[in-house]
Image (tube, coloured by chain):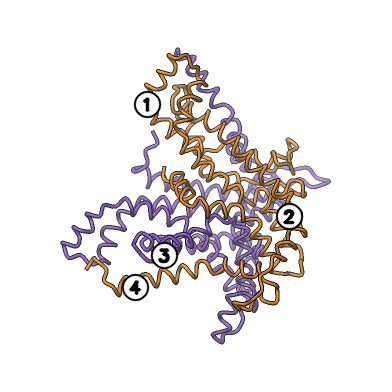
Amino acid sequence: MLNPGRTDTLLNTLSAWILGIVWVLPLAYAVWSAVHPSAYATRFELGAPLTLENFRAAWTAAPFPRYFANTFALVTSILAGQLVLATLAAYAFARFEFPGRDLAFALVLVQLMIMPDVVLVENYRTLRAIGLVDTLAGMALPYVASAFGIFLLRQTFKTVPRELEEAARIEGCGVLGVLWRVYIPLAKPVYLAYALVSVSYHWNNFLWPLVVSNSVETRPLTVGLAVFAGTDQGIDWGIINAATLIASGPLLVAFLIFQRQFVQSFLRAGIR
Amino acid sequence: MTGRHHAVVGWLLLLPAAVLLAAFTHYPAVATVWHSLWSTPKANRPARWAGLENYRALGDDPVFWTALVNNAWYALGTIVPSIALAIGMALWVDRKLVGRGLLRLAFFTPTVLPMIAVANIWLFFYTPDYGLLDQLRGSLGLAAHNWLGSRETVLGAVMAVAVWKEAGFFMIFYLAALQQQSPELREAAALEGCSRWQFFWRVTFPLLMPTTLFVLVNAVINAFRLVDHIVVMTRGGPDNASSLLLFYIYETGFRYWDASYAAALTVVLLAILALLALVQFGVLERRTHYQ
């Protein structure tokens, strides 16, 4: 019997919902304790008074505005660098014949396995040698050339009909002109998908920024949050949970608004 | 354009990315092998040639072996459940269930949270007495338990966190694959009198194989690459029971500042990743066409 009966649908709906509820419980509990006074943190009453006091306390207890600015600068500079470098490299791989191209492409793909996080000890040594420890530039640099971005854009550029490029050349476009007028506009959805994936990855990235930064001036949100939760706050969970929500808030809100685009982007970026 | 001109422009376009990739991917991979053969310089003693000394120390280091074994269990214990759950979730939200949109949202939301935030949320969830888990246990009359503080449960507890974060991410790939499967398959199977269990194992699951392979590769890499939650939740403890390889590298490199030994550990991690790449290449070659 392939077509589900009524009991069957009911059972499936029920189990799906149970799993769904289990899935939101940890987050829901954190939200509960963040929006209620600490007396109600573990008492679940519908009439419990709501408060934003925890958010205010967290916001003033740590330099969150500075952390936000750092994360914003980090994420945008990485993205900008990635887009420029990946576009140029992808164009070279997709449309130019040069000796060593296939070997170079294979070497680029190596980064899909050896991500900068994995070789953090050596990369830290390099940063120290060039004096970029505890700078946002040093934090961004290892990620600016992205094998993943190059790969994604190369696949896209390869689908562009050559006739379009030839037509643009007849119109008098040079190499970069063709790239700008023909290839980049046609790859817009891929750029959007890549940008969303990159922003969420670097907004959330932790280990490498933790290693590189050791001052408030350079710490991104994730590291700032870990420092804040790690220093002894007398462990007021309401405040820590509020800080956690502050740090993940912008991305979470963006996701809730642009759900479909997020999921599409992750898919497009994943299925190569 | 002449062939030569073509080549020059091609290399020029590639150059900026190539320089950065070489500096932060290829050079460190090679340099870590070289540096692992030297001793760590101290204040009054420069680095000296150590040969395989670091590797000998590694063989005798119980913490290293614990981290390695932990990592193997951690990989197994996160990958299998998250893939199984992802398939289940995808099958559910692919059907016309009540509240399908909300369910999809519930499953996928952990994916967009930073791992650090996830770690904090679960730290709270696991807190002895106070946390939701112990409160639920308390209402069933069970005693409080220090989930992250005891050797027996800590690895399982951090695995649950990773599964929670990843399953929804893998779900979307399965969902996309399911939506591409032709409904005619189902009709044909119904005519043949196929049961749903048979249909899943004989038709749906084999057709999901490419997706499973893709998800598997991602899951394995993540199992060795993502240790943010370990840093926040357990610091590898108690007694290294939740230490993973990359976390041990981080500790060795940036808490004990033993760069040479950390380099040797990194070589082990790179060897594992290279092995995985070879397996992936062997298995996946037939279906991915790069050219």
Mark 1 → mark 3, Cα distance in angstroms: 43 Å
Mark drawn on residue B99: 3
User: CB under 8 Å between callouts 1 and 3?
Assistant: no
Whether marks 3 and 2 lie on the same chain: yes
> Badge 2 is on which residue?
B256
Q: Residues within 10 Å of mark 2 (few under 14, many from 20)?
A: few
Three-letter amino acid code at disc 4?
A: Leu
Mark 4 → mark 3, Cα distance in angstroms: 13 Å
Residue lying at 48% horizontally and 70% vertically, measured from the top left: A21
Please report whichever mark, 3 or 2, sits nearer to the chain's N-terminal start: 3
Three-letter amino acid code at disc 1?
A: Pro
Q: Residues within 10 Å of mark 4 (few under 14, many from 20)?
A: some
Mark drawn on residue A10: 4
Residue lying at 30% horizontally and 56% vertically, measured from the top left: B206
Three-letter amino acid code at disc 2?
A: Tyr
Instruction: Look at the picture and state if A2 lies above or below A207.
Output: below
Provide the chain ID for the residue under circle 1: A
Provide the chain ID for the residue under circle 2: B
Mark drawn on residue A9: none
Which of discs 1 and 2 lies nearer the camera? The answer is 1
- For the C terminus of chain A, which image quadrant? top left
Mark 3 → mark 2, Cα distance in angstroms: 51 Å
